[in-house]
Amino acid sequence: MSARSGFGWGTILRLGLVQTALGAIVVLITSTLNRVMVVELALPAALPGGLVALHYAVQALRPRWGYGSDLGRRRTPWIVGGMALLALGGVGAALGTVLVAGQPAAGFALLVASFLAVGIGVGAAGTSLLVLLSTGVAPHRRGAAATIVWIMMIAGFVVTAPTAGHLLDPFSAARLVAVSGGVSGIAFLVAVAALWRVEPARDPGPAGSAPARPFARVLAEVWAEPQARRFTVFVFLAMLAYSAQELILEPFAGLVFAWSPGATTKLSGVQNGGVLAGMVLVALVTANGRGRLASLRLWTVAGCLGSAAALAAIAACGFAGPEAPLRPCVAGLGLFNGIFAVAAIGQMMALAGTGGAPDGESRHGTRMGVWGAAQGLAFGLGGFLGAAGVDLARLAFGTVVPAYAAVFLAEAALFLVAAGLAARIGRPDRAVRPAAGLTMRHAV
């Protein structure tokens, strides 16, 4: 399916169901099992934390999965295989959680294997799904398609977490395994049904084409492309800033403004509502593909600049005292986060097919894998660095408000740097250097 013909809205919704299925399994593993380990089983919080970090670390392998889908010239087998591995990881994680209390060695080994499977499954399925969208969605629909797919993934979170919580009450080991197995199985079947006949039969490639190049060489060639390299650094910095506030915003409101747990939870809801509004805004404005406001680069830059301004405003609220407009500032942060995120995903889909390749070889999956790896690693580091940064700043300043303000301003600075990079993405370079001689050590 080429971008010229383009997937219809019905097909985009079907692919969104794959993200819904993926999100349903992931939220069960990273949220529900996390709570069960810490609360019901009284295990150290470091155990689920380390397992989730392992799941993020495996995202570094995304370029390899994308390269594999490039070789096969079809994405569906990689999506289905990734979802199968993810579903098995979901069931295995539940079994490992049950075993770890009574048989620590066996339970821990199963948990490590299961979270590795989850990380690999998410990477393989998620990367190839984005590539399938990038090659099948018409350019003017990319912003809207990214919004639909991500909203449907969030829907997977929203539906699965409370439903699983209801089914787990009263808690028992058997219920945990049954619910995890049921969610994983249903999610896998939904994904397979959604993918049925979406992708055409395998393209054999050009006649007489040369053998596929080794992965290491292909990765070096992709990294040698200025646009791909610049976009990788942009994704890492922007997602680092995006994720660094996740673990510190609610404690900030509690410590500085003396808000109750219920009030800080509502604050997160305000932020998430802003994210949704930002995504929908970009989808509506860019859907027709006409006019300057349809530029995804413009919205990416605007989202980064607005996020930086909102973080600076949140830092200022700490000094202003209880009457400061914290909620509007947090809503603004969510709005601009949503704008930048969906616009960046749309640009990612557009840039995956640029840069050229010898003998007509596809590089879509490898490029998308590199960017996915940058996103996954940034997410894994962001929460830890944000929380650790507050602790270090409190030691340095001795008080709470300057400590949180310093971290929020550091995140704002990251967004400003990301905005500068985003402004250059998609524009021709002044001087095109040959790929030969470039290495992965070259700067952006």
Image (spheres, helix red, strand yellow):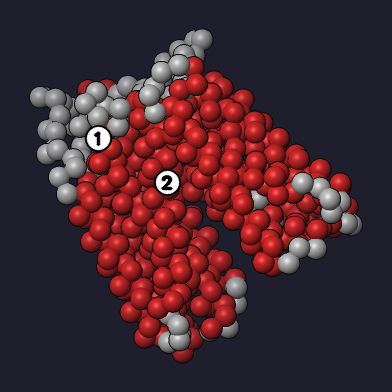
* Figure quadrant of residue 107: bottom left
Question: Which residue is painted at 43% across and 27% down in the image?
Answer: 286
Query: Can residue 189 be seen?
Result: yes
**Label 1 SS:** loop
Report crowding for label 1: few under 14, some 14 to 19, many 20 or more residues within 10 A (C-alpha).
few
**Label 2 SS:** helix
Q: Label 2 near label 1: C-beta < 8 Å? A: no
Residue 144 placement (x, y as % from top left) = 39, 35
Residue 304 placement (x, y as % from top left) = 61, 33
Q: Earlier in the sequence, mark 1 or mark 2?
A: 1
Number of callouts in the render? Answer: 2
Question: In front here: 283 or 111?
Answer: 283
Screen quadrant of the C terminus: top right
The vertical placement of 166 against 24, above or below, is below
Question: Which residue is painted at 25% across and 41% down in the image?
Answer: 10
| Residue 82 horizontal side relative to residue 321, left or right | left
Distance (Cα) linking label 1 and label 2: 17 Å
| Residue 199 horizontal side relative to residue 308, left or right | left
Question: In front here: 204 or 329?
Answer: 329
Q: Which mark is residue 415?
A: none
Residue 83 placement (x, y as % from top left) = 29, 57
The vertical placement of 91 against 442, above or below, is below
Q: Nearer the viewer, mark 1 or mark 2?
A: 1
Residue type of the residue flagged with mark 2? Trp
Question: Which residue is painted at 69% across and 62% down in the image?
Answer: 263
Residue type of the residue flagged with mark 1? Gly
Question: Which residue is painted at 54% across and 20% down in the image?
Answer: 424
The residue at which mark 1 appears reads as: 8
Question: In front here: 318 or 60?
Answer: 318
Q: Which mark is residue 150?
A: 2
